[in-house]
Every structure is written in C-alpha cells, then in structure tokens.
Image (cartoon, rainbow, N blue to C red):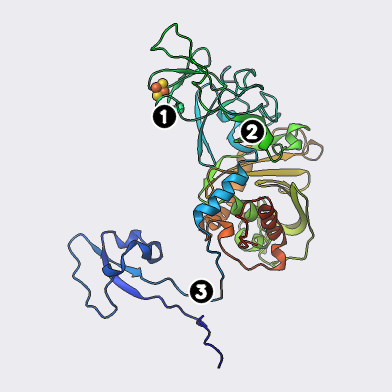
C-alpha cells in the first residue's frame, strides 16, 4: 500500500490562538510574532477558554504552528553560523567598498566590513574626492593593493604616506578597546583616542602616549591596520594580506580610465545578504512585474532564452528588453513609449556588477554590494555616460538619483523580504529565465561561499 503523502494538497496545519500580549495589535502582524518566542506551556489548547485580558494588554492572534509548505522543500541542515563563517571567510579575500571617497576627509569616519568595525580618515588632510559629482573620480591615492596588512606590517604605501590618501584601522584602541572613531585627528594627522589621547599614525602605529612624555612607544603598541585603495569614487578595503587576496579590486574603466562624466549615487544600507542584492540586480524576470512604474513593460512578461558565460572571475549575460521610458510623458493612450534596451551584465565576482545600457545606449551603471556582515549589505552605485553619445556636460545627478530611487525602493523591499536570508540555506526552484542567477550562485559556491557539501541555493 502506498504511503500517505505527508504534504497536504492545500491549506496549512497552522493553529491560531488568542493570547494576551503586551503589544498594541496595530503594531504587530500575526506573522511578525515568532512561535518560538512563546514556550509550549504558555500556549493554551484550542479548547481552553480565553483568559481575561488584563488592563493594558490587548489580544493578538498568534500562530502556534508553522504553515505546512505547499510543495516539498528539502532544507539543508546547516547552522546559520556555519553558513556565515563560510561566507565571511570567502568574502574576506576580496576588495569591497567601505565608503565613498567624498565622504572621507580629515575627520574619522566609521565603516563596517564583514562585521569588522573600521575607522577611516585622511591623515594628510581632508582632500576629499568628489562624491555624487561629475568628472574624474576622487583619485587621491594609487589604486590597487596598498601593501601588506597586520599590525606594524605596513611596508607599502599607507594613507599616512600618500598625499590625501585614506588610512583604515580596525576601530578599536589597543589600550582599552575604545572605538578610535570616537577620537579626533590632531594637527599632524594622527588619530587621538578619546579615552587617554594616545596618538595613532595612519599605518596603525601608536606614536605618542601622553601619560609618558618623552618615553619611546614600544613597537608592539599598534592598532590593526587594513589595506585600502581608492578608485571609481570609492574607498575600498581588503581584510586579508596580499598573499591571501583572491583577486584585485573591481575596476570601473569608464570612470577610472576614460573619464566619462558620471554620478556617484547615494549609499543605502539593506538588511539582506549581498548575494540576494546582486542576484536581484541581475534578475531579468522581475522587470515587467516590479518596475512597471519606471522602466518595466507590463505587456511583456515572457523572457526569451539568453546565453550566460562564466569564467573564474566573472559571470556575463546580455538581454534585449522592451523597456518603457521612465522619464517620458504618457501618450494619448496613457502609455509611455517603449524602446529596446540592450542590457549587458558583467558580474565581477563576488559582489560588483557592471551593467552597460542601464540608462540606454552609451551608459554604464556600476553597482557594488559591500557585505557589512554575512547578512547585511551597504549598496554603492554610480552611472557613467559616454561623452561621444551624451556630450561631455555634467550629469544631472539629482534627476538620475530620483529615477533610481524609484527603482531601488521596490527592489529593496523584495530583497529584504526574502527568506531564508542566507541564499545557501535552502533549495529554491529555478526556471530557464533564472539562468544568470543560477550561474551566479554556482560561481559563488565554487568560490567557497557555501560550506563544503551544502547543495542549497542552486
Ligand atoms: S583606551 Fe585608547 S588610549 Fe586608552
Ligand atoms: Fe529591480
């Protein structure tokens, strides 16, 4: 006799109870209350008479069982901590943005990369590069690796040595653990701790202990330095030594080499894994669903087959999409004009995406998802325009930002809603139009972003 199908054809096994909870019902939806937050003994049976609600407490509908899935789903039994450890170990071997160049000056600035708090400043002064402006980017120092890292191991150029260059230290004073970013930069460009005013040079060396004037500071006293570089209007950091670096930082040749007029967009913090954001940025199938108020064409949901190419460093694809002009006024029929947009994607693994055609012919967008932790990201983006097509006048950054804000907003809402947060924590179903996302996930897995043996995600 065949065994019974354990998955119900429809509906759920959820049981709903009414419990007094000290939260206003309007501020909490049933799904926002975690069943695990209530011990079984605290949950009355379905037949129990509801307890009287004490004054000040309001009844809230509480789910006491997780809805049964509507389809079989095999979830890898991998702890979040294990997934996060693999993610962090893999991601640490790459360069990631930690600030816009124009946001870092003589005063200390906080940043976070993979859970590591950082402090950034320009020891030689506040020669900020432009942010959100046109023309050459804020190239105040040489691009690329800035020498080996580690306490006292800075033999290469550092922020202290480069005129206007950025210094980056782990944001923790080696004396008593106070955040160095709470300190001030003195007239010599040294960062002085807020607690005892020890002075730190851009390479992390402690160069003065005011409580012991005239005494040489032992070499062992240093803040942890981090390798930094600048390019494409961003400050980049890499948490590992050069020997452990997986590849050089991504470059944006249209800005860094060709000097295309450009706009550096506003930074956004998303409560999502960087993998999810990158995949969303490259997800063709959602254009005609999620972005119909801007470039999405609600009349064309079908996605034609498209080739995906992958090598060790990139995943590439291109697609011709019948997009709607987000800036055009509707015609007499209420529709805005439609034109073909030729999108060309190049994912610079793991989290940078170069997208040609984003704003039509002769335009390139660069979106980089910096993993502030294994489950959060800071999004940087910029767009550049070929002067041969658009002229060499300044980019209307405010107008561009306004349009992009309308595109990022629904993307952010969707990506932050995705569960599980960790892309390799569960199997998900894929269709042919997901080809770019699937190739991206497999590339990440091959690069070690999932623990060995984990088959979820792709
Ligand atoms: S805690 Fe920083 S100098 Fe004492
Ligand atoms: Fe989108």
- Say which of 452 and 33 sits in front: 452
Percent x, y for residue 43? 28, 70
> Can you identify the residue that label 2 sits on?
241
Percent x, y for residue 442? 69, 57
Local SS, label 2: loop
- Say which of 396 and 365 sits in front: 365
Residue pictured at 69% horizontal, 67% vertical: 301
Check the image and report above or below for 87 versus 38: above
Q: Is residue 311 visible?
A: yes
Q: Is mark 1 within 8 Å of ligand 1?
A: yes
Q: Does the residue labelled 3 lie within 8 Å of ligand 2?
A: no
How far apart are labels 2 and 1 at the CA level? 23 Å
> Can you identify the residue that label 1 sits on?
177
Q: Which residue lies furthest to the right in this view?
A: 388
Residue pictured at 71% horizontal, 58% vertical: 439
Tell whether label 3 touches label 2 (CB within 8 Å).
Answer: no
Local SS, label 3: loop
Q: Residues within 10 Å of mark 2 (few under 14, many from 20)?
A: some
Q: Residues within 10 Å of mark 1 (few under 14, many from 20)?
A: few
Find ligand 1 in the image and state its quadrant.
Answer: top left
- Horizontal side of 372 relative to 337 (left or right) equals left
- Say which of 396 and 145 sits in front: 145
């Amino acid at each position: 006799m065949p065994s019974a199908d354990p998955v119900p054809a429809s509906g759920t096994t959820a049981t709903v109870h009414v419990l007094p909870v000290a939260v206003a019902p309007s501020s909490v939806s049933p799904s926002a209350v975690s069943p695990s937050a209530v011990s079984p003994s605290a949950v009355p049976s379905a037949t129990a008479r509801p307890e009287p609600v004490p004054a000040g407490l309001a009844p809230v509908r509480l789910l006491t069982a997780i809805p049964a899935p509507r389809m079989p789903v095999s979830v890898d039994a991998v702890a979040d901590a294990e997934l996060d450890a693999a993610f962090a170990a893999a991601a640490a071997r790459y360069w990631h943005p930690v600030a816009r160049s124009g946001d870092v000056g003589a005063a200390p600035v906080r940043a976070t990369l993979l859970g590591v708090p950082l402090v950034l400043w320009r020891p030689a002064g506040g020669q900020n590069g432009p942010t959100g402006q046109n023309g050459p980017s804020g190239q105040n120092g040489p691009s690329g690796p800035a020498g080996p890292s580690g306490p006292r191991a800075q033999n290469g150029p550092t922020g202290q040595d480069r005129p206007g260059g950025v210094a980056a230290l782990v944001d923790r004073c080696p004396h008593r653990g106070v955040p160095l970013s709470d300190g001030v930069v003195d007239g010599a460009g040294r960062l002085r701790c807020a607690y005892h005013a020890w002075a730190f040079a851009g390479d992390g060396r402690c160069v003065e202990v005011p409580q012991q004037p005239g005494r040489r500071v032992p070499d062992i006293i240093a803040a942890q330095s981090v390798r930094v570089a600048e390019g494409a209007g961003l400050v980049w950091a890499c948490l590992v030594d050069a020997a452990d670096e997986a590849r050089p930082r991504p470059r944006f040749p249209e800005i860094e080499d060709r000097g295309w007029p450009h706009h550096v967009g506003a930074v956004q913090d998303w409560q999502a894994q960087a993998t999810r954001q990158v995949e969303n940025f490259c997800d063709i199938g959602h254009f005609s669903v999620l972005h119909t108020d801007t470039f999405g064409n609600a009349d064309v949901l079908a996605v034609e087959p498209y080739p995906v190419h992958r090598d060790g460093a990139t995943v590439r694809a291109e697609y011709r999409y019948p997009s709607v002009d987000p800036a055009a006024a509707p015609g007499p029929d209420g529709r805005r004009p439609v034109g073909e947009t030729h999108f060309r994607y190049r994912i610079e693994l793991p989290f940078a995406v170069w997208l040609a055609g984003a704003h039509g012919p002769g335009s390139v967008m660069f979106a980089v998802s910096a993993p502030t932790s294994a489950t959060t990201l800071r999004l940087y983006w910029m767009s550049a325009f070929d002067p041969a097509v658009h002229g060499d006048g300044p980019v209307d950054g405010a107008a561009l930002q306004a349009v992009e804000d309308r595109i990022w907003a629904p993307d952010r809402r969707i990506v932050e809603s995705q569960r599980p947060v960790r892309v390799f924590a569960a199997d998900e179903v894929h269709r042919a139009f997901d080809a770019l996302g699937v190739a991206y996930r497999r590339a990440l897995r091959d690069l070690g972003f999932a623990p060995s043996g984990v088959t979820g995600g792709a």
